[in-house]
Image (cartoon, rainbow, N blue to C red):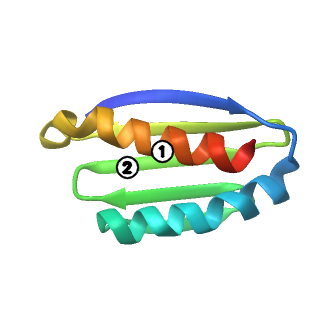
Amino acid sequence: MGKKDYSFAHTLGVAEGARRLAPELQHLTQKYGLKLECPGDGQFRLKGSGVNVTIDVSASNAKVTIELGMLMEVMRGQIEQALSRKVQKVLA
């Protein structure tokens, strides 16, 4: 799997950042057939066939890790772009 990390600065705090991200991530799960898990405060996991995304929201930062299987590598640009836009938009 190819793994890549991204970091998005914000000033919202953990609770507000997570609250804003949750509906956007739910939309992505429905659009791309992914499973959403929320293992802890400010933590999100999106899982699907060949796709694993981890989002950890801290008080001033959201760290996004994207892991793609070989077959999904061809869609890396599209997946990264969609996630980056969503995260930046809601944390602005």
Q: In this view, does 12 lie to the left or right of 68?
A: right
Q: Which mark is residue 52?
A: 2
**Which one is in front, 34 or 37?**
34
- At horizontal 37% and vertical 59% (from top left) the residue drawn is 47
Neighbor class of circle 2 (other Cα within 10 Å; few <14, some 14-19, many 20+) is some
Q: Image quadrant for the N terminus?
A: top left
Q: Which of 88 and 52 is in front in this view?
A: 88
Q: Which of marks 1 and 2 is in front?
A: 1
Name the kind of residue labelled 1 in the image. Answer: Leu
Tally the marks.
2
* Residue drawn where x is 37% and y is 49% of the image: 52
Q: Which label number is shown at residue 58? A: none
Q: With 1 as the anchor, is 6 left or right in this view? A: right
- Residue 91: which quarter of the image? top right
Q: Judge by depth and name the residue closer to the eye, 28 or 47.
A: 28
Task: Give the residue displayed 55% in from the left and 48% down from the top.
Answer: 86
Q: Mark 1 points at which residue?
A: 83
Q: Is residue 53 left or right of residue 88?
A: left
SS category of the residue bearing label 2: strand
* Horizontal side, residue 86 vs residue 32: left or right: right
* Residue 22 x/y as whole percent: 63, 65
